[in-house]
Amino acid sequence: MKKHISVMAVVVLATLLGVGVNVSPAALSDIENLGKFVFFQNISDPPRMACATCHVARAGWTFGVSGVNLHQVAATGANPHTRGGLKPPMSAYASFSPPFQVSPLPFPNFPSGFFGGVFWNGRSEGADPQVFPNGATVRIGDEVFQDAGGAFIPGLETAYGKYLGPVAEQAFNPFLNPVEQNQTQLGVCRTVASAAYAPLFEKVWKEPITCEERLEVNYKRIAVSLAAYQSSPEVNSFSSKRDIALKRELDGIDVDDTPGQFPLKGLTAQENLGHDLFYSTLANPLIVNGVPKITNCSLCHANTPPVIDLSTVPPTITPGDTGVEPEQTYSDNSYHVIGVPPNPEIPGFPVFNEGLKTHTGLDAHLAAQRSPSLRNVDKRPDPDFVKAYTHNGWFKSLESIVHFYNTANVNGVTAASFGITECAEGIATEKDALANNCWPRPEFPNAPLSAINIGLIGDMGLTLEEEAAIVAYLKTFTDTATPKKPQPYLERRPGRPQATGALTAGPAPSKPEAPLTADSAPREKTSGR
């Protein structure tokens, strides 16, 4: 918490003074710096892909090639003859997801019955024991804190235990995936061991990195270091317009009648209306000209959604978050089915990704995908840059996806008011659907958890002006701070500072230098995002 606030304080000061954001490298700890070096280095076979290739900070920590987002959506692998099968999810704020677990609340809260974990299907559980071990990724545990004899190395677990979990276990996978970085544990280990920053590994883990003995432990330590960087205030800066406006009220800089509550003085009337619509649920409907507006956005996109108790008559609804939480990530970290149309341009079409079912094996979880954080949902390097939304990237704009949430039920009153129908066969892309004022059938029209069929979305009764207000509010979640790639590592010596990266509001990072690789170890079984 303190780290996030310290970054925010600098951002607010910079905003007040009208200068760019430049946070000191001291904001990162040694293990965070180690993870950052790994994150930005091309560790792949051939050496043309880094973690930062698919998770580009200036593009909101997802894929940074506009043309790919517009069509193929899935990233081409280090091997240029391979492609992934899903949109790269945002890596920022993923560290706020808890381990995969059973929901303590009955249906309809967390309708899948589970929450937590990362990847679109939650298979990076970070749970001990694992909930669905047959569908989960490799678990990382206390072995990373032990020496070769099994004794705990003093201080490591206390310092780094907080980085074990879903993000560390996620970081284990892309290096080894043939359609992503296409490396081996040995190749990754040798690349890090031969890098200029290798002394930082020994400083962090209290042992030099060795790749012939204890290969898997050191590979897991690399993954934990990546998790540390992705948990840092540099990646999760909470520096958006919404954050700045909220903090200015809490600090007494902007004074109004409701300090720290909406409407915020630092947001426009349209953005504040978007907030009110975003949080309008049965627990807290927004009345507009005598008409209740219920969007249910915050049922999935809030850290703590409203709680619905069906055991009472009438049902009892306890309000959840209101949007003023300092570390709001706008995700319940659970799994939902919103009825996304098939994307004919994504690799693998016409076979559709089955979502959470591929992790749990349960038919009830067909098509359920993890609710992404909405932070940086509009962050892009330039106004013409195209972003892709949802797991298959069918949507190319916030305006389109909000319109879908409002009108996706083609048999509903709202769709009828717009003249929207179900698309005829052959109308498949977002561009063609919008041109023909229709929505294609979902990938899985009869998915058990379909939010359209249940009635949670798709018939909201919003006007175009109200849709635009929600879009304006979503755009206030864009972080103003953007990390640069690290400068070449220099061992810390008296009188000479260690060079690392820093936050910046300036130019985009350049392509990382490619290292040597090795591929003498066998491939591990992998799967897509």
Image (cartoon, rainbow, N blue to C red):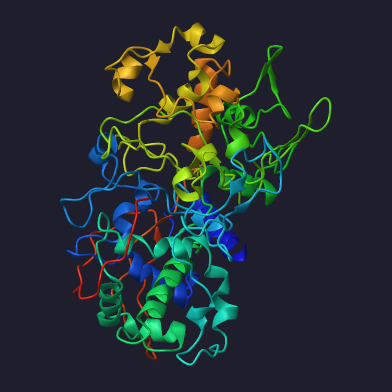
Residue drawn 18% across and 74% down? 516
In this view, 356 is above or below 123: above
**Residue 255 vs residue 6: left or right?**
right
Residue 299 is drawn in which quadrant? top right
Residue drawn 53% across and 64% down? 165
Residue situated furthest right in the rendering = 313
Q: Position of residue 326 (x, y in %)?
A: 63, 51
In this view, 70 is above or below 500: above
The N terminus sits in image quarter: bottom right
Residue 25 visible in the shown view: no
**Residue 130 vs residue 182: left or right?**
right
In this view, 467 is above or below 255: above
Residue drawn 66% across and 28% down? 280
Q: Position of residue 498 (x, y in %)?
A: 37, 80
Depth order, front residue of 399/303? 303
Depth order, front residue of 99/526? 526
Q: Position of residue 377 (x, y in %)?
A: 45, 41
**Residue 231 vs residue 56: left or right?**
right
